[in-house]
Image (cartoon, rainbow, N blue to C red):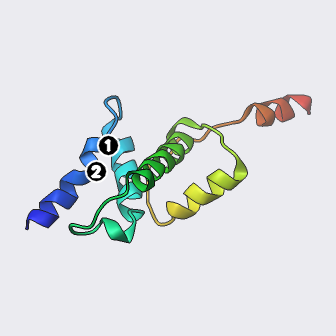
């Protein structure tokens, strides 16, 4: 039982102060789905791997909810990692290039 409680509370410490509930639920699911297998139980937890996962979760959330752009390789990686995560009412963004293209015609 302690392990289940610990697992449920684990990602909460990584929630950003200003992160709204909707964004956090999606990012929390991303984190939990992509935790390295050696993070289960009482195994030692390498800080570098969780730091990388947290960074990737922010890249994914920033792209999804805020329209931030990143390199194709990085976006491909986080989109693959997020496969199967369902998020409702995702905002649709128009890039500067798309706007300029519309005005040229």
Q: Position of residue 51 (x, y in %)?
A: 43, 48
The image shows residue 93, relative to residue 43, as above or below, that is: above
Marks 1/2: CA distance? 5 Å
Please name the residue that numbered disc 1 is placed on.
14
Local crowd size for mark 2, using a 10 Å CA cut-off: few (<14), some (14–19), many (≥20): some
Q: Quadrant of the N terminus?
A: bottom left
Going by the image, does 98 lie left or right of 86? right
Q: Position of residue 20 (x, y in %)?
A: 34, 35
Local crowd size for mark 1, using a 10 Å CA cut-off: few (<14), some (14–19), many (≥20): few
Q: Are marks 1 and 2 in contact (CB under 8 Å)?
A: yes
Q: Residue at x 85, y 28 (%)?
A: 103
The image shows residue 38, relative to residue 74, as above or below, that is: below
Q: Residue at x 31, y 30 (%)?
A: 17
Q: Residue at x 69, y 55 (%)?
A: 73
Q: Position of residue 94 (x, y in %)?
A: 68, 36
Q: Quadrant of the C terminus?
A: top right
In front of the other: 3 or 98: 3
Give residue 73's mark.
none
Q: Residue at x 39, y 55 (%)?
A: 31
Please name the residue that numbered disc 2 is placed on.
11
Going by the image, does 13 lie left or right of 66? left
């Amino acid at each position: 039982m302690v392990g289940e409680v610990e697992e449920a509370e684990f990602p909460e410490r990584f929630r950003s102060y200003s992160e709204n509930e909707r964004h956090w639920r999606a990012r929390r699911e991303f984190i939990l789905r992509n935790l390295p297998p050696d993070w289960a139980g009482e195994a030692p937890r390498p800080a570098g791997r969780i730091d990388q996962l947290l960074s990737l979760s922010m890249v994914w959330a920033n792209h999804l909810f805020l329209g931030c752009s990143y390199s194709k390789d990085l976006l491909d990686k986080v989109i693959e990692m997020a496969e199967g995560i369902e998020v409702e009412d995702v905002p649709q963004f128009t890039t500067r290039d798309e706007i300029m293209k519309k005005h040229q015609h």
